Image: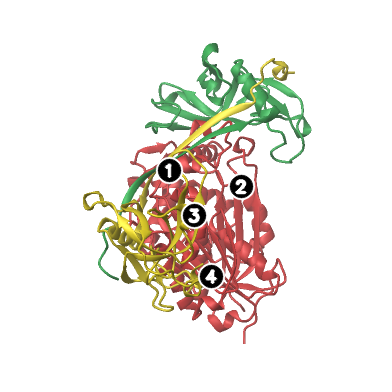
Chain colours: A red, B green, C yellow
Amino acid sequence: MSTAPQPKQGTRPVAIVSFAQAPTQRRIEQANEVELLMPVISEVYAQANMTKDDVDFVCSGSTDYLIGGPFSFVTALDAVGVWPPKRESHVEMDAAWALYESWVQLQEGDLDVALVYGFGKSSLGDLQRILALQLDPYTMAPLWPDQVSLAALQAQAMIDRGLATEEDFAGVASRSRRDAMNNPNAQVANDLDVATLLKEEYIASPLRRHCVPPLSDGAAAMILVAGDRAFDVVDRPAWITGIDHRIEAHAFGVRDLATSPSTTKAAHMAGVGEGDVDVAEIHAPFAHQEILLASALGLSSATTLNPSGGPLAANPLMAGGLIRFGEAANRIMDGTASRAVAHATSGPILQQNLVAVLEAAS
Amino acid sequence: MAEPTEVYTSTHVLEYPYSRSVGPVIGAFLTGLREGKIVGIRGENGRVIVPPTEYDPETGAETSGFVDVGPGGVIETWAWVEHPRDDAPRSTPFAWALVRLDGADTALLHVVDAASKDEVTTGARVTAHFLDEGERQGRIQDLCCFQLEETS
Amino acid sequence: MSDALETQDPVTMLSTPIRLDYDFTAGVAQSRSLRGYAEGRFVGQRCPVCKKVYVPSRGSCPVDAVPTKEEVVLPNTATVTTFCVVNVPFAGQSIEIPYITASILLDGADITFMGLIQGIPADEVRMGLRVEAVWVPKEELGPTLASVKYFQPTGEPDREISTFREHL
């Protein structure tokens, strides 16, 4: 009989027991947000052999700017089943932070099961303009800097520091898209070598097309269960044994962009370095960020990075971070890993970083 | 699943005519730009923050004391854009850059005007170039770009 | 030190207009309702679990969290469940005040939507009033709720509140 491992934070072990995602596409026209979420939420319930009545708490992540309508998370709740009245919350963050809020809620002890989901369609609006709105509105947003150019500032800082080369970036992209060929939910999957990729043009130097994530429509959902009840749902629950979230200054002109101290701190608090890491799913939308984050997380070359293909293969905004947690949890649940790291980011140029260690019970 | 239904799509435009109250600190920065200069503020340990904020962005400590910085500075990092977007500050190729102005300890995001990517390097010296006095309105666009300083 | 604060006319406000362009998609369920308007009829969807009919439907039963795939064509007749008298002029108003905005419960539907009431003095509108949809001329029908011009009284006896209490 397995017992839940004691978590590093909090007092109550919490596990991911079920995860589903919509196959990511460039544009999903045949579904509004509710229709996008319904099959995904049905699937997480089915996997866990649960119904909406088993869920004590619902938490989602989304942003209204993507759809261009106010309070889109409220209408999305039509997909969830909120009667009899449910406890519910929402974050205007990637749904990985909805997972974090749910984890905190489950620590309280009076709730056992949480449904977490996130959804985002980048096809409806102009993502570069929408993301510019998360910048300082007085001195930055009026210039409408696009996210690729801002990420390129970081990539150049890494090159100048001798931390990586354009070949390294291409190496990350080549491996990610090749791994994505085994991921049915991926959007960009191909087998191109580094030399081929380096012939591509720059979008914003030093980032070539392959260093940039696809524009994606997608959604993901997950069920968290607290305590030994998780063993009733799945043979190998993915126990969240450490979790921490750290932020840096919003104004990236005051930061050292070639490093990610918030990731390093969160990884330390989550206990990443306290054991071998079989697999890490890193929310690195741009190729250079995987190199930066793997270093900040303190991972060794023994760790398999983003076997799903990562955000370079599919990048649905507001769900992409939760998908990292789901993919890492799947590796635990399917027995291919016994200790995994999941990472999610939010805000301009890796401002916020959430790190968790997922483990199988011994 | 049934056969795909023909779905309705529609263009949809959102416009927000925001008018922001800037407060005394960002107000001083924008007032400075209107006068053709760049103003920072002293944060924790006396380091000079540009653009100025009411608080030290890293420690949260209160800031005080405006300081003129620039107009010269150094490119800390940059990104060359060969095909600018329609909403970019330049319609011809340019570089986004983080520029640390002389006298400042943090970097300002703006545009570097250069004829080609080959001219731009990290560490290169640049100078702020403003709109003409009559065109300046007290906004970040008053600083129209940075230009590379002549190297001897 | 800077003398920026000593200017006679410091900058206090900043205009930062934002324009965002979207290419919106209605999805399947809403498209069916919209196509219904273009055909001059109300199209809803029924929940397979609780059997409630939603019009328009977003493709799910918000109570049971299941897809609502069964299409239901609803009649033009309806009951006013509740209403308000609009006396306040506002920008873009296209109707003379006072006018009535009502919660409309189509016969056979389990959810109300907002509709305009015409053909009756404002002070005679009441809960339970029986009404019917008046559509724009056929050539003006389109995939929009604006295809319904307004609702007008049918002259039938009022419905008891107890018959629609659940929908208030």
Type of residue at label 2? Answer: Ser
Whether labels 3 and 1 share one chain: yes
Marks 3 and 1, how far apart at CA: 15 Å
| Image: A25 above or below B112 | below
Alpha carbons under labels 3 and 4: distance apart: 38 Å
**Do discs 1 and 2 share a chain?**
no
| CA distance separating discs 1 and 4 | 40 Å
Residue for badge 4: A82
Q: Secondary structure at mark 4?
A: loop
Q: Nearer the viewer, mark 2 or mark 4?
A: 4
Q: Nearer the viewer, mark 3 or mark 2?
A: 3
Q: Secondary structure at mark 2?
A: loop
**Identity of the amino acid at label 1?**
Glu
Question: Which image quarter holds the N terminus of chain C?
Answer: top right
**Residue underneath mark 1:** C96
Q: Name above or below for residue B91 compared with residue A37.
A: above
Foreground of the two, C48 or C19: C48
Which residue corresponds to mark 2?
A260
Q: Which residue is mark 3?
A: C123
Q: Nearer the viewer, mark 1 or mark 4?
A: 1
Tell me the mark number nearer the camera, choosing from 1 and 2: 1
Q: Whole-Å distance between the Cαs marked 2 and 4?
A: 39 Å
Q: Are marks 3 and 4 on the same chain?
A: no
Label 1 marks which chain's residue?
Answer: C
- Tell me if C163 is positioned left or right of B75 in this view: left
Amino acid under label 4? Val
Chain ID for label 3? C
Q: Position of residue A301 (x, y in %)?
A: 53, 58
- Disc 2 to disc 4: CB gap under 8 Å: no
Q: Tell which circle, 3 or 1, labels the residue nearer the N-terminal end.
A: 1
Q: CA distance from mark 3 to mark 2?
A: 67 Å
Are the two marked residues, 1 and 4, in contact with CB atoms closer than 8 angstroms?
A: no
